[in-house]
Image: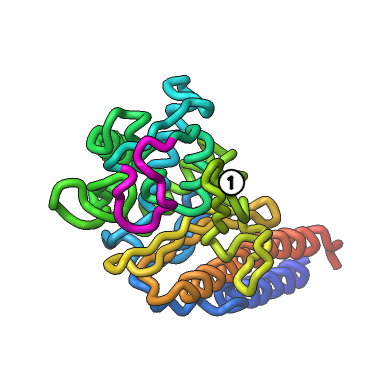
């Protein structure tokens, strides 16, 4: 009996050494990040799997529109506005800087049309038009953005100066600022509260009625885009760029029942943000699989040991 106990103990120690030595990160190399910040988060648990400068505030560009989308969808659910509402484009919206779809003053579109344009193409003129429709002015909408940031637990580093992430409203800071961790938390909250956002953000193309415009999605990671940067299971969420912010990305992938969110901020090229996000996802899913496998193997081996008959 004593020999069996000793032999079993030695076996258990050896198994532990072997399994503990095989860490998940040894199976897939840690991502090589050159961007200003990057972060990988489990959408369900909020666990931060990888962080590179993830708590440092940086210009957020159109990643700001994740908050815009959250507020608009909340307003729709509350019945304060309707998808069929007609939005008349103001002079302020029509003359917005940055990426837009050349909306003219007094043009009219539905809330639903403009929301699709924001989700697929990140147009600034469409964003301002929706902000004005929902809250009367961009200024009031920005106040709500900052209030909402605090209410959902984003850090004090997140500060919105406008609805678009492009230009300032009144000569103040030219950018909105967020941390990569806050972008990930906001992305997870948006998906949880409004899962339909994934259907919007994963559309490859959107048409703007009466404009004859067909806008392609700027997120090259989407599974259904089928390009060189497409990632299996990718269905969102938002790209962004300004000269100060560089190329930014909030991307999400669901695989084997697990949803991960990857944030890239301050990449030097469009391609870099997708390449680094791919590295994050590869590492994250390998980490999740190997950790699960480790637990299962350990439990199975230990069960075999304790069930062995004594000699």
Left/right of residue 101 with respect to residue 131 in the rendered view: right
- Residue occupying the point 68% across, 73% down: 15
User: For mark 1, what is the residue?
Assistant: 198
Q: Does 265 sit above or below residue 132? A: below
Q: Quadrant of residue 5?
A: bottom right
Was residue 191 drawn as part of the magenta stretch in this picture? no
x, y percent for residue 145: 31, 39
Question: Start and end of the magenta stretch?
Answer: 93-107
Color style of the picture: rainbow
Q: Does 184 sit above or below residue 115? A: below
Was residue 98 drawn as part of the magenta stretch in this picture? yes
x, y percent for residue 184: 43, 53
Which residue is at the front of the view, 107 or 266? 107
Identify the image quadrant of the N terminus: bottom right
Identify the image quadrant of the C terminus: bottom right
Spot the residue most to the top: 79
Left/right of residue 175 with respect to residue 49 in the rendered view: left
Q: Does 80 sit above or below residue 300? A: above
- Residue occupying the point 39% across, 72% down: 267
- Residue occupying the point 42% across, 31% down: 87
- Residue occupying the point 51% across, 68% down: 277
x, y percent for residue 56: 28, 62
- SS category of the residue bearing label 1: helix
Answer yes or no: is residue 185 visible: yes
Which residue is at the front of the view, 63 or 169? 169
């Amino acid at each position: 009996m004593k020999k069996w106990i000793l032999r079993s103990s030695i076996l258990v120690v050896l198994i532990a050494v072997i399994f503990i030595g095989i860490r998940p990160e040894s199976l897939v190399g840690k991502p090589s990040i050159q961007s200003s910040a990057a972060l990988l988060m489990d959408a369900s648990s909020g666990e931060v799997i990888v962080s590179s400068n993830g708590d440092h505030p940086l210009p957020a560009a159109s990643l700001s529109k994740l908050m815009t989308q959250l507020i608009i969808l909340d307003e729709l659910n509350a019945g304060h506005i309707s998808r069929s509402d007609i939005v008349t484009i103001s002079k302020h919206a029509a003359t917005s800087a940055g990426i837009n779809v050349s909306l003219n003053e007094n043009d009219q579109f539905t809330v639903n049309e403009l929301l699709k344009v924001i989700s697929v193409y990140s147009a600034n003129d469409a964003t301002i038009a929706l902000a004005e429709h929902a809250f009367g002015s961009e200024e009031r909408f920005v106040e709500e953005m900052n209030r909402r940031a605090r209410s959902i637990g984003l850090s004090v580093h997140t500060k919105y100066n406008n609805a678009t992430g492009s230009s300032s409203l009144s000569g103040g800071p030219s950018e909105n600022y967020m941390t990569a961790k806050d972008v990930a938390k906001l992305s997870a909250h948006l998906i949880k509260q409004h899962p339909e956002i994934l259907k919007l953000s994963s559309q490859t193309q959107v048409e703007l009625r009466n404009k004859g415009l067909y806008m392609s999605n700027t997120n090259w990671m989407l599974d259904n885009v089928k390009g060189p940067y497409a990632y299996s299971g990718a269905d969102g969420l938002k790209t962004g760029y300004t000269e100060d912010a560089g190329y930014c990305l909030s991307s999400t992938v669901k695989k084997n029942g697990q949803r991960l969110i990857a944030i890239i901020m301050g990449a030097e090229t469009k391609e870099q943000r997708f390449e680094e996000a791919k590295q994050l996802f590869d590492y994250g899913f390998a980490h999740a699989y190997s950790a699960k496998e480790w637990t299962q193997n350990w439990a199975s081996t230990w069960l075999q040991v304790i069930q062995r008959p004594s000699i």
